[in-house]
Image (spheres, helix red, strand yellow):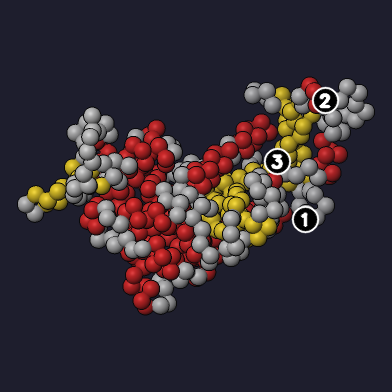
Amino acid sequence: MIKKIEFSAKNLTSNAGLFLLLEHANMNGIFELIDHNLIFDNASTNKIKMNHIKTMLCGNFIGIDKLERLKLLQSDPLINEFAISIKEPETVSRFLGNFSYKTTHMLREVNFKVFGKLLKKKNLKSITIDIDSSVVNVEGHQEGAVRGYNPKKLGNNCYNIQFAFCDELKAYITGMVRSGDTYTANGAAEMIKEIMTYLNDEGLEITFRMDSGYFDDNILETIESFGCTYVIKGKEYPTLVTQVTDPSVVFVTGEEGRETTELTTALNTWGKTRRFVVSRVLKDEKDRKQMSLLEGEEYDYFYFVTNRTDLSSEEVVLFYEKRGNCENYIKEAKYDMAVGHLLLQSFWANEAIFQLMMLAYNLFLLLKMDFANGTEYRQQIKTFRLKYIFLAGKITRIARSVVLKLSKNYPYQEIYEKSLP
């Protein structure tokens, strides 16, 4: 039984897995990429930027949700071996306050380039890009946080964050923090143009997948202008409802049991006709009307607009249903990377924090792609941290070498052995 505690041990770390992430990021040129692409106008800020960026990434790797948590790393000898000096939270906060629209956009460009590294490693020929938004509740008076659609706390100020993920890689492509009252589709067409600026020369077949909040003619035209395809959930407009509920319309039951039909039509404000796939599902018995005067009232209808000619009606519905993956990626970003939890007063500081969190998210994927086994790639970050990051270690110096000592019985030794330069 332990009867005494002594605080006398030296050169111990509880985050030995930071070695994996920092060493791997360095080997992949991530820090050089940031240094080259993130330029502040102020010379003194530019001089200290890399120390603070590395500080924030270390914090994101262990999942901090407040700058105060950075103190957990201040005396970590492993951090010191990478020449990172963890400053006081107030000092880091002042640095983040130096970000502007210009410099946060530079961080977005860094994230595009890191995504490009993931893309090249897999050598994919086609990808699916999911665009979605998520509300972040705010308990304060941060810049840009206003009342909007906030399902968790009605009437509270909030931010609305827009994300773009590559489903095949689970990877973050780009995104932005927006005011809480921003409509879902606002800025989506511009985001698609930005994405295609980076990906247009990759020779990829790209399909955009979005929910009904992005059911907008301008968005469809933007995607079409780049020769890309899309599957987007439609809204229940009268133009569609009247055609689908006509008794002459035939629904076909597919192999998966879904009833679908197709329309080629244009909404009143559209300049062209497009292909619509309609799926219907029988309502629960308790919701069905005993006496129905209108044909089809016993069904719920779901509308999808698409220019994918290679997919049958049922396949279009099945393809859209995989959009739930994107919702899981957003949840992982919010709960495992603390997106929306670590907030400062400045809007641009919060945008910078978001971009750095998502950079750390992709660096986890980059590490897993190179060293973890196939099943671990899609493992949640919180699980990966418990297995590889939150690990006790001791740093010792033998002759002219620095040695990181880990437990003899550690069950996942191979990933550390493979990561050594």
Q: Which residue is drawn at 57% across and 63% down?
A: 142
Q: Residue 304 carries which label?
A: 3
Q: Which residue is drawn at 68% across and 23% down?
A: 257
Query: Is residue 302 toward the left or the right of residue 162 in the image?
Result: right
According to the image, label 2 marks what residue?
Answer: 288
Asked if residue 233 is positioned above or below residue 221 in the image, the reply reads above
Spot the residue most to the right.
293
Question: Does dot 2 land on a helix, a strand or a loop?
Answer: loop
Q: Residue 271 carries which label?
A: 1
Label 1 CA crowd tier, 10 Å (few <14, some 14–19, many 20+): few
Return the x and y of residue 176 as percentages of the image width and height: 55, 58
Residues 326 and 252: in front is 326
Return the x and y of residue 132 as percentages of the image width and height: 60, 48
Q: Which of marks 2 and 1 is nearer the N terminus?
A: 1
Asked if residue 13 is positioned above or below residue 344 in the image, the reply reads above
Callout 2–callout 1 Cβ contact below 8 Å: no
Question: Does dot 3 land on a helix, a strand or a loop?
Answer: strand
Residues 127 and 112: in front is 112
Residues 398 and 39: in front is 398
Q: Is residue 144 visible?
A: yes
